[in-house]
Image: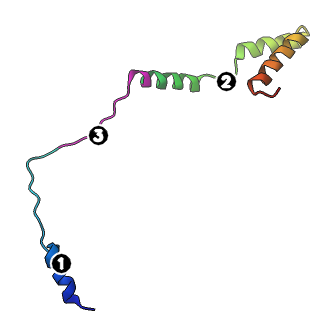
């Protein structure tokens, strides 16, 4: 292997010379993040939903009291309609 050949290639491309970079002044760059009004509204709504309970305690208490009293009744046709609506959402029929 000829080392002097590599040195000659280095001289051709001037890879051994270091160039100085000149600075023209201080550049201060900082990252910024701007959230739109719609983004803020979405974030507030999302936080409100996560804080809200999935269970509606008032409805549960009313149905529970009605069941314990023996007065809770479910209409067969109403139940069937709601069941069909749910199946139609997922195109099961």
* Crowd class of label 1 (few under 14; some 14 to 19; many from 20; radius 10 Å): few
Q: Which residues are magenta?
A: 28-39
Q: Position of residue 58 (x, y in %)?
A: 71, 13
Q: Position of residue 65 (x, y in %)?
A: 83, 12
* Left/right of residue 18 with respect to residue 63 in the rendered view: left
57 and 31: which one is in front? Answer: 31
Marks 2/1: CA distance?
71 Å
Q: Which residue is drawn at the image coordinates 18% and 78% (left, top)?
A: 10
Which numbered disc flags the more N-terminal residue, 1 or 3?
A: 1
Q: Residue furthest bottom?
A: 1
Judge whether 35 appears above or below 68 on screen. Answer: below
The dominant secondary structure in magenta is loop
Q: Which residue is drawn at the image coordinates 87% and 13% (left, top)?
A: 67
* Crowd class of label 3 (few under 14; some 14 to 19; many from 20; radius 10 Å): few
Is label 2 in a helix, a strand or a loop? loop
Is label 1 in a helix, a strand or a loop? helix
Which numbered disc flags the more N-terminal residue, 2 or 3?
A: 3
**1 and 3 marks in contact (CB < 8 Å):** no
Is label 3 in a helix, a strand or a loop? loop
Marks 1/3: CA distance?
40 Å
* Crowd class of label 2 (few under 14; some 14 to 19; many from 20; radius 10 Å): few
Which numbered disc flags the more N-terminal residue, 2 or 1?
A: 1
Q: Position of residue 43 (x, y in %)?
A: 47, 26
* Residue that label 1 marks: 10
Which quarter of the picture shows residue 14? Answer: bottom left
* Left/right of residue 89 with respect to residue 35 in the rendered view: right
Q: Which residue is drawn at the image coordinates 74% and 13% (left, top)?
A: 59
18 and 1: which one is in front? Answer: 1
* Residue that label 3 marks: 31
* Residue that label 2 marks: 54
* Left/right of residue 27 with respect to residue 93 in the rendered view: left
Nearer the camera: disc 2 or disc 3: 3
């Amino acid at each position: 292997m000829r080392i002097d050949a590599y040195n000659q290639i280095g001289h051709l491309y001037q890879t051994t010379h270091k160039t100085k970079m000149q600075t023209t002044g201080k550049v201060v760059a900082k990252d910024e993040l701007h959230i739109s009004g719609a983004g803020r509204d979405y974030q507030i709504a999302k936080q409100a939903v996560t804080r809200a309970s999935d269970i509606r305690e008032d409805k549960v208490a009313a149905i529970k009291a009605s069941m314990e009293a023996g007065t809770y009744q479910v209409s067969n046709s109403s139940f069937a309609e709601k069941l069909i609506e749910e199946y139609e959402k997922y195109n099961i029929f």
